[in-house]
């Protein structure tokens, strides 16, 4: 079994952009950087991407998606109510590195076959006075 990984002109793995939803069901995506809670982030299955192929052990989340915040919990469920299975991950807020004034957060990771993924969503920070 050979695994083929698409590469860009520099020989680096091409990255698949995925649709993520920070705090599904709410907008704006308000995050209190001082919170001791968790931030739910959904990776949505689309016509061109199956979120069930993501390896949760490879996923990182934060202001740029390269932070050390790994999920503390994940599940496969239909997050957006469209009839397909999405992945929901939970991250400890304090581990994400999100700071007051940040306006977006990103997620990076890989599928089980090694395809690099990335996605981002808007956030609003609260509790920053």
Image (cartoon, grey):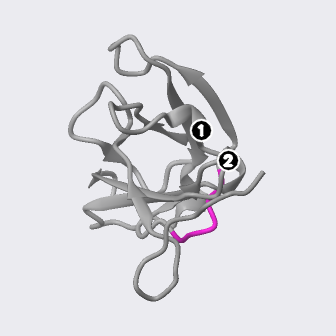
Residue 53: mark in rendering = 1
**Image marks 2 and 1: residues in contact by CB distance under 8 Å:** yes
Identify the residue at image location x=63%, y=26%.
Answer: 75
User: Going by the image, does 67 lie left or right of 99?
Assistant: right
Q: Secondary structure at mark 2?
A: loop
Against 121, residue 14 (above or below) is below
The first of marks 2 and 1 along the sequence is 1
Residue 8 versus residue 20: which sits nearer the camera?
8
User: Going by the image, does 91 lie left or right of 126?
Assistant: right
Mark 2–mark 1 Cα distance, whole angstroms, equals 6 Å
Residue 83 versus residue 27: which sits nearer the camera?
83
* Quarter of the rendering containing residue 76: top right
Residue 122: mark in rendering = none
Q: Main secondary structure of the magenta part?
A: loop
Residue 65 image point, x, y percent:
47, 65
Viewer can see residue 68: yes
Boundaries of the magenta span:
66-70
* Quarter of the rendering containing residue 105: bottom left
Q: Which residue is mark 2?
A: 112
Q: Say whether residue 26 is magenta.
A: no
């Amino acid at each position: 079994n050979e695994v083929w990984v698409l590469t860009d002109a520099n020989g680096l793995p091409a990255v698949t952009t995925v649709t993520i939803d920070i705090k599904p069901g709410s907008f704006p995506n308000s995050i209190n950087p001082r919170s001791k809670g968790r931030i739910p982030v959904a990776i949505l299955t689309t016509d061109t991407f199956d979120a069930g192929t993501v390896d949760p052990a490879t996923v990182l989340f934060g202001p740029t998606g390269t932070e050390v915040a790994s999920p503390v919990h994940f599940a496969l469920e239909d997050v957006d109510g469209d009839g397909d299975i999405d992945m929901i991950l939970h991250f400890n807020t304090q581990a994400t590195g999100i700071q007051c004034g940040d306006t977006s957060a990103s997620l990076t990771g890989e599928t089980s076959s090694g395809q690099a993924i990335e996605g981002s969503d808007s956030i609003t920070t609260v509790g920053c006075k």
